[in-house]
Image (spheres, coloured by chain):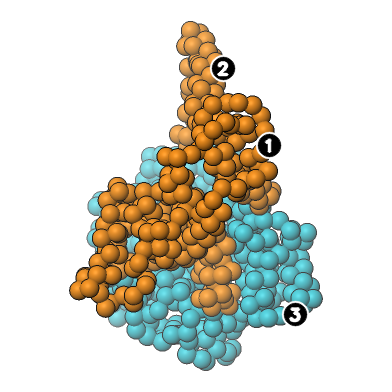
Chain colours: A orange, B cyan
Amino acid sequence: MTAVSRPLATSGAAATRRPPRRFLHVLDHWFLPGFTVLAIGYLLIPIAVMIVFSFNDYQGKFNFVWHGFTLQGWLHPFDWPGLPDAIKTSLLIAALSTIGSTILGTFIGLALTRYSFRGRGAINGLIFLPMATPEIVMGSSLLTLFVNSGLQGGMLNGIVPKGVLFPLGFTTILIAHIMFNISYVVVTVKARIAGFDRRLEEAAMDLGADELTTFWKVTFPLIFPGVLAASLLAFSLSIDDFIITSFVSGTTNTFPIWVYSIIKNALPVQINVVGSMVFLGAVLIVGLSNIRQARANR
Amino acid sequence: MSEIDVRLVDVVKRFGDSNAVDHITLDVNDGEFFSLLGPSGCGKTTTLRMIGGFEQPTSGLIELQGQDVTWLPSYKRNVNTVFQSYALFPHLTIEENVAFGLRRKGVKDAEVKSRVTDMLRLVELPGFEKRKPNQISGGQAQRVALARALINRPAVLLLDEPLGALDLKLRKQMQVELKRIQREVGITFIYVTHDQEEAMTMSDRIAVMNRGKYEQLGDPESLYERPQTRFVASFLGVSNLLAGTVDGTADGYALIKLADDTRLRVPVALVDGNAQIEVGIRPEKVRMNTPTDAIPAAANQLEGTVTDVAYVGVSTQYIVDSKSGIPMTVYEQNIERTTTGSLYRQGDAVRLSWLPEHTFVVGGAPAATPAG
């Protein structure tokens, strides 16, 4: 009621008093659009620089100064020692940690919104902790934990099979990424489930669907947009994580770790190329999901 | 005696400290339009949800066609529900919504298609197959919900205030429609509503519920003409209730003495041995007379003064303060008087009269009588 009447009231007030209306006009037509352009520019200029410099015909070791246009970088995007392996590792870890954290996080989200049980409030709070904890703290504590499991007489010695948590490498990176992704998935999925009408599940059961069928035919399709958003978030968090990964990666290189390791000696154009590819890939996925959303609403 | 479709035996549902449903026992016959009527919080929806399998009773027994289903999940019961909020699946088309139950049973594609078409025709929504629930109106969604339930040919259809979200005109139209559909398919309907007129219009029998129990169960006419409790008398229509004590009998009538020593007659059978009773009379059964009009000797009489007049077209509604201090509501059909512009006016002295046969009695000690 008030939401409907309020816009009417303001336009009425604006019509009776002339100067504010003129002021609002300037605000609406010049100031806000101008401000928006500035803000978007602020956001996009670094990306634009990255893309532009991926076409740079750079001299020497560092791709910092513009020397002219070339397609060399894009024609040989992975042509640098260690780069292909680092990208493969990054993609694999991102994919696996996305799958793992999405499954675990979705079920945690469902449990936390569906059922009331002892300790639910505490868990709801604890879920936020990994997001709130500084990454550097998390990284160092994970490192301590992992190293302990490998030490003779260490904390986890004998509990966790050897080779899982130590030596450091692919598995430990994966475990760390799943761990910090879960919180984000839970929070995203919970937001979607909060608006879910339980009557829909009752209706499905009423129509002869057992619990499992109800989940796959009704619950999951309806929370799917939330699950998808959560998994995209998890993927993007995993693929560019540096701080935690740097603590637990051992000798394994992910793309960010690899970039950091060579940047002291060289800054090849391939970094810009791969960065641009990741960016364009993200744009493509967002675009596709927008199209899909528009189709679903039609 | 027709077959019993649904039987509740001593069913109790506790939520925390209170009994939402408090020892209900009732039988619903096959093919019957049965209503649970009562104010919000009286336990009618909880009762329905227990029959549907969405709640388990704390104690008691629920039978469907002779089978004990008390602990059966809803998907194993041969009942279907029309939810108050319709609960249509927003991600599915109307066709897929209606077909949902048949798909679960593994009915063949061709049969599903033809049954969905038939069902949408029955609820007068042919051609809506490909739409989504957010592309239809509330009234249409209501019909889809009905079709989605009925297509499964359940033994019993449960309806939880299905017309609650519709506007008055559409509601009236859907009442007629629902009754038509129920006659056509011959399925037992259990209908939950708080709207007494809706229940009266459609039901074969009504259980009037209050505080987790039903106070009276019967067909609409007997509930209206012979309400047995104060609650039923006032929840179903309007009643004038006059508290009094039984003071002897005469000519087959019990004499009831009111606070101001006025004596009323009621058929002896209604008094049922109680000493303190309340005599009830419906407003449309009371006649307005001038103090000098002749009144049949057998009729009950009350003198009073008109305190309020409301002309509502088809009738005029009066409030008359009787001498015993109790305000009486009287409805008079606008047949003769209104045409000559001679309605009673505020302040007129009148004599109310009605036949003893039209009275009803609500038993037991009366609640506090209105201050006079």
Separation of residues labelled 3 and 2 (CA atoms):
60 Å
- Which one is in front, B115 or A117? A117
Could you tell me the amino acid type at mark 1? Leu
The disc placed on residue A71 is 1
Residue at the extreme top: A19
Q: Is residue A8 visible?
A: no
> Which one is closest to the eye, mark 1 or mark 2?
1
Q: Chain of mark 2?
A: A
Q: Chain of mark 1?
A: A
Q: Within 10 Å of the Cα at label 2, are there few (<14), some (14-19), or many (20+) other Cα atoms?
A: few
Could you tell me the amino acid type at mark 2? His
- Which one is in front, A200 or A135? A135
SS at badge 2? helix
x 77%, y 68%: residue: B117
- Residue position for label 2: A29
Measured from the top left, where is residue A157 in percent x and y? 25, 74
- Residue position for label 3: B108
x 37%, y 85%: residue: B60
**Do the residues marked 1 and 2 share a common chain?**
yes
